Amino acid sequence: MATKTETSSLTVQAREVAGSRAARRLRRSGNVPGVIYGGGADPVAFQVDARLLRNTLAHSHAVLELSVGDAKGSPVVIKEIVRHPVSGEITHLDLLRVRMDQKIHASVLLDLVGGESAPGVIEGGVLEQIARELNIEALPGDIPDAIHHDVSELPAGATLTLAEITAPAGVELLDDPETVVATITAPRLQLESETEIEEETELVGEGAAEGEAEPEAEAAGEPAAEGEGAPAAEE
């Protein structure tokens, strides 16, 4: 199940490319620098208010209706977002012009639902999601926010591959169908067998007996005290 893309609007301002120092000044003033590519046109450098960008991306879908200044809006998708390694704030944004009637490649999130109800998890297994994004091809308007897959029936020891994921209408999955996207590890046995317990008990007992014999061996090697069979020292 997936939700088809809706369009959110974003207005940015054109800027001159003036090097990294100018970009740092932009960021200090609360703006994010970016570049628009593709569509058979020259790249356009822009700047956008960081708060406006955060709010737009938080509520946007795959396609943005982008306006540069007072120009008419055109559809774009996010090509790359660069974030600060510590704060996570966006430091640069690359956008790609698209045509709504031409398919493009994109990455979408894979959302596994119902994991807490899976028999394998209830029995003590652990659900591990290995692939969190899927590569797809679709028209910009058909790109979903995420692809959802129900894992509530997975037993312990199960392996989920891409071949079992159903792509929404108009979307083609590009990765290898044999790609493992999730597993449920079988629960570990909490109790040892009686034989293992008995063997461990015997080993512990043998170790204790050897530890008690050591002081006697040391005592046997000590010289006897005078008057207890030891020869008297010559004067």
Image (spheres, rainbow, N blue to C red):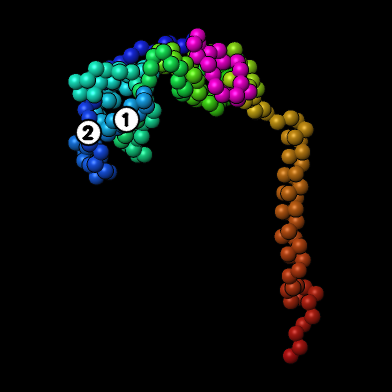
Q: Position of residue 36 (x, y in %)?
A: 32, 28
Q: Position of residue 32 (x, y in %)?
A: 26, 33
- The residue tagged 2 is 15
Specify whether residue 184 is in view. Answer: no
Question: Residue drawn at (73%, 39%), measured in percent from left and top?
Answer: 200
Asked whether, in this view, residue 18 is left or right of residue 39, the answer is left
- The first of marks 2 and 1 along the sequence is 2
Q: Looking at this view, is 82 or 44 the one in front?
A: 44
Q: Amino acid at mark 2?
A: Arg
Occupied quadrant, residue 158: top right
Mark 1 Cα shell of 10 Å, populated few (<14), some (14-19), many (≥20): few
Q: Position of residue 189 (x, y in %)?
A: 67, 27
What type of secondary structure mainly makes up the magenta span? loop
Separation of residues labelled 2 and 1 (CA atoms): 14 Å
114, above or below 94, in the image: above
Identify the element where label 1 is drawn: loop
Q: Looking at this view, is 214 or 47 the one in front?
A: 47
Q: Position of residue 193 (x, y in %)?
A: 74, 30
Question: Residue drawn at (26%, 43%), measured in percent from left and top?
Answer: 19
Membership of 161 in magenta stretch: no
Asked whether, in this view, residue 227 is left or right of residue 181, the answer is right
Q: Amino acid at mark 1?
A: Asp
Of the numbered discs in the image, which one, if any, rests on residue 152?
Answer: none
Give the residues in magenta.
163-182
Q: Looking at this view, is 115 or 211 the one in front?
A: 115
Asked whether, in this view, residue 204 is left or right of residue 146, the answer is right
Mark 2 Cα shell of 10 Å, populated few (<14), some (14-19), many (≥20): some
Specify whether residue 40 is in view. Answer: yes
Of the numbered discs in the image, which one, if any, rests on residue 42?
Answer: 1
